[in-house]
Amino acid sequence: MFRMLYAVLPKHKDDIEPMMNIVSWRIGDDFISVVFPRRSHRPACYDAVGDAQLLVSPGAVDMAGLLILPREEDFLRITPEAVHQIYADVSMSFAEQLTVSCRLKDRYLQGNLRSFATPFVHEPSVTVGVVSGEELHFSFNKPYSVNGEKVNGVQTVRYSEDEIVWNGSRYRKLVFQPQFNDDSFTLDDVTIGAHFHWERKEKQTFLGALRLTVDTDQVLAINELPVEKYLESVISSEMSATSSLELLKAHAVISRSWLLAQMMKRRAAHNETVHHSSWVRRDDEWIRWYDREDHRLFDVCADDHCQRYQGVTKATNKQVAEAVRATRVKC
């Protein structure tokens, strides 16, 4: 945070760094630092003549509130108005503070985007909640690995006493990893169009990893895969894959931007201590809205609530892949 502030503070002519004072102290294990941006080294009264002169040159202690007056006569005749003017002369104006504040917010957002991309090297992975139930049926179309072993073919897991039961053993969570980029798995009874008139269940096939975890009294299946591969499926699921290239590009930009915003919200939520409720209930009304707070265990869901995502079940074509590739921002 200090580096960002240091970068946006203005420099005066011939200065090699911004002018500021810093006061720091410790409370228990916490360190607190306050930065006082400066606009000048000394107030106008320092160089004044006659009765207008006050020999005061504020440093860090003065900026923190203890004004040092070396001459007794200055101490005896200084007024609150004079003190206010001294601080006004050496401190940034309100307009300058607003400018710095705007620059700092911009730098902070840019820094967040950079740090957001850094852990993933070049391309982040998205976690998508696909389906949940007391019992899930799925199959691996090629060998996957879990706990150092390879598994293939048809599988069944079920919920029991806050655990996942699979192959006679109990787990809190299971992560099945693909061996190659084109490895896939198929989930049975995936609900699409939830709460709409076209709601139905169908088998769907997905690339990437399969994560199973306990969610309340059910087993939740989460698909983890690279963002750009996810987008290829979203574009083909939300609209026709045979649409014009420019329309597909526009959709790719919108879908990617919304997705990354949701992923950043989830990250920020992990660092917050305040709980955000997604519903309000009163005597005469019950208000509920659906957004980031509804998904605690994954970034986005696979249905219309977020973005429709049907894995590789929904056929794509080269034009969809080209639209995603052409709009991608290189990290």
Image: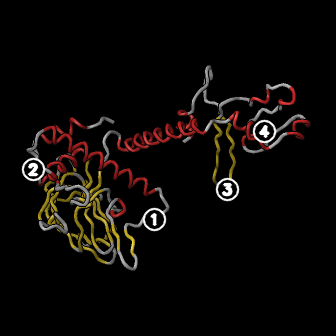
Task: Residue 21 in the image: state x and y as whole percent.
Answer: 68, 37
In this figure, which residue is indicated by the disc labeled 1? 275
Could you classify mark 3 by the number of other residues whose Cα lies within 10 Å: few (under 14), some (14-19), or many (20 or more)?
A: few
Of marks 2 and 1, which one's residue comes earlier in the chain?
1
Asked where in the image residue 110 lies, by quadrant, the reply is: top left
Q: Is residue 141 left or right of residue 92?
A: left
Mark nearest the camera among 4 and 3 is 4
Task: Residue 96 in the image: state x and y as whole percent.
Answer: 58, 35
Q: Nearer the viewer, residue 209 or 118?
A: 118
Residue 28 marker: 3
Real-space Cα distance between discs 2 and 4? 75 Å
Kind of element beneath mark 3: loop
Specify the amino acid type for callout 4. Ala
Specify the amino acid type for callout 2. Ala
In the picture, the quarter occupied by the N terminus is top right
Q: Is residue 202 left or right of residue 324?
A: left
Mark nearest the camera among 2 and 4 is 4
Could you classify mark 1 by the number of other residues whose Cα lies within 10 Å: few (under 14), some (14-19), or many (20 or more)?
A: few
In this figure, which residue is indicated by the disc labeled 4? 82
In this figure, which residue is indicated by the disc labeled 2? 315
